[in-house]
Amino acid sequence: MHKIYIDSGSFNLVYQLPQIVYSYLISSGINLIIEYLSLSENTIILIKSKISIHMNSKKKIINKMKIKFYFFFIISFILLLLFCYYISCFCCIYENTQIHLIKDSLLSLGLSSIIPFIINLIPGIFRISALRNKKCDKKYMYKLSQIIEFV
């Protein structure tokens, strides 16, 4: 807030960029927790692929999935309420910084949309060029794309 006051209300991207990156990293950590609680593809595939699993163990797995989903909805709802409360209090106290908050939020949203696109595009470029090669001498490029995808 003091930096905005010193800059006479002008938007300083160089100063705001580290804070935007920090918020991206924190939200990515929260996102990993939420994804762990909400994604259940592997569990469903496990249930479908193993026909010999007893009904009791299938029911136990389904009950565990239900518990994960309950935690997902409870945690998501609590976080949503806390974030809304925090932002509304912040905007009420610092009325003149609402434009900065909107700009920072839009930049953070843009970064969180563009970065995964770029990260997923790089292995694809290597893989496509390796697969289009008719001589099949670019198997190392294909292996590199798999390593990049893993990282």
Image: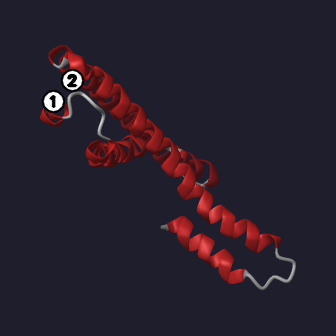
Residue in front for this viewpoint, 147 or 105: 105
Residue 7 at x, y = what percent?
20, 34
Name the residue: 82% across, 76% down.
133
How many angstroms separate mark 2 from mark 1 (CA)?
A: 21 Å
Name the residue: 68% across, 64% down.
125
Q: Which residue is mark 2?
A: 86
Q: Is residue 129 visible?
A: yes
Query: Is 123 placed above or below 35 here?
Result: below
Q: Which residue is mark 1?
A: 5
**Amino acid under label 1?**
Tyr
Q: Is residue 4 left or right of residue 120?
A: left
Query: Is 52 placed above or below 130 here?
Result: above
Name the residue: 19% across, 14% down.
92
Q: Is residue 63 visible?
A: no
Residue 41 at x, y = what percent?
55, 46
Q: Label 2: few (<14), some or many (≥20) within 10 Å? A: few
Q: Is residue 62 left or right of residue 12?
A: right
Name the residue: 28% across, 31% down.
10
2 or 1: tag closer to the N-terminus: 1
